[in-house]
Amino acid sequence: MLDAIRNAFSLPDLRRKIVFTLLILIVYRAAAHVPIPGVDSTALQRFLDSGSQGSTVIQFLNLLSGDALARIPSQIASFVSRQEWLDLILFSIITMLIIAVITFVQEGQRRIPVQYSKRVRGTKVYGGQSSHIPLRVNNAGMIPLIFAQSIMIFPSAVAISFQYSDNTLVATLAGDVVRWFTPNSGSYPYWVLYFLMVVGFTYFYTDVIFKQQNISENLQRQGGFVTGLRPGKTTENYLNSVVHRITLVGTLMLGSVAILPWLVNFLPGLSQSGTQTQSLIITSTGVLIVVGVVLDTVRQLEAQLLMRQYEGFLQ
């Protein structure tokens, strides 16, 4: 690992890319603390805090940015100041488990063996090689969470406008909708529906992306076939069944990540911390974003190093 890092910085073009990226991150984090003229920072903080507790557009933007991940240091400092050592240990274990599970599922894949038949063109022989088709367990990434979250915030965002209506029936119905679609520990319909929508969108998005690739047709055109299966419709049905089976693991992972702020309330002792508990645990979506970006960055660095005949990060 250290040799790979040393080799990465020994290449001028790769070193410039890494340093430039780090400088951009430093500028971004420094500029985030620069006050904007004419903006009341106290009122803005109250607005963001109220938005993170309710089903509002601010919560959706917070999901896209993964801002909750940046709160981990302050939340840990708060636990230390309150001397809640048991909660801190449990939170640390949960966070590490989240990162491990997300990384394991994100990198998980099912390799389908493929054999290419030999073709003779003139005096040259092509093909006759074996390869594999990597089918990813989580082929949808963050997209299902974003789709589900954008739909889940819509009912309460509309109903909150009618919550103080002069019509008693309308005001009562709007209040019930806001209460049902607000992500708190007592909103069982919200979390159940959120989980089902994440599962549904994961299967839908994976199915759409996989069918667009036309893998079975491309294999048949290139003279390849899955070992033990006839090219064409048989191969297509087999690949679809494999994708549907392995996607189940990805859907359960994404669904669990989505409703983790609700599940943590069932752990003994943690629910007593209230909002502080959910502020730290909700970073699971932020961790999903960060893990995906880090893995993609490692792959790109790996490709750059291997292209120059250096040993990469991944063994």
Image (spheres, rainbow, N blue to C red):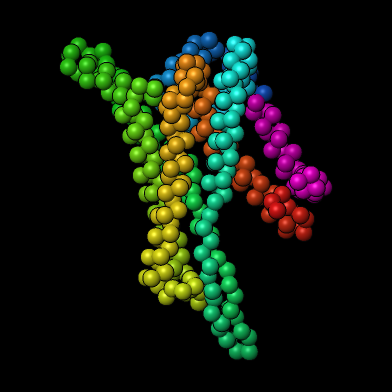
Residue for point 69% across, 51% down: 314
Measured from the top left, where is residue 190 in percent x and y?
Answer: 34, 29
Q: Which is the main secondary structure of the residues drawn in magenta? A: helix
Asked whether residue 152 is in view, the answer is no
Residue for point 59% across, 30% down: 93
Residue for point 45% across, 61% down: 213
Residue for point 59% across, 15% down: 84
> Residue 21 colored magenta?
yes
Measured from the top left, where is residue 221 in percent x and y?
Answer: 47, 74
Comparing 113 with 167, the one in front is 113
Measured from the top left, where is residue 18 in percent x and y?
Answer: 72, 41
Vertical relation: 119 (above or below) 308 = below
Vertical relation: 108 (above or below) 270 = below
Please give the count of numbered marks on the rendered protein. 0
Question: Which of the 4 image quadrants contains residue 231?
Answer: bottom left
Asked whether residue 138 is in view, the answer is yes
Measured from the top left, where is residue 28 in percent x and y?
Answer: 64, 28
Residue range in magenta is: 1-29
Q: Would residue 243 be found to the left or right of residue 118 on screen?
A: left
Vertical relation: 300 (above or below) 225 = above
Question: Which of the 4 image quadrants contains residue 252?
Answer: top left
> Residue 253 colored magenta?
no
Question: Which of the 4 image quadrants contains residue 161?
Answer: top left
- Of all residues, the one furthest to the bottom in this rendering is 123
Q: Would residue 295 be found to the left or right of residue 17 on screen?
A: left
Comparing 261 with 287, the one in front is 261
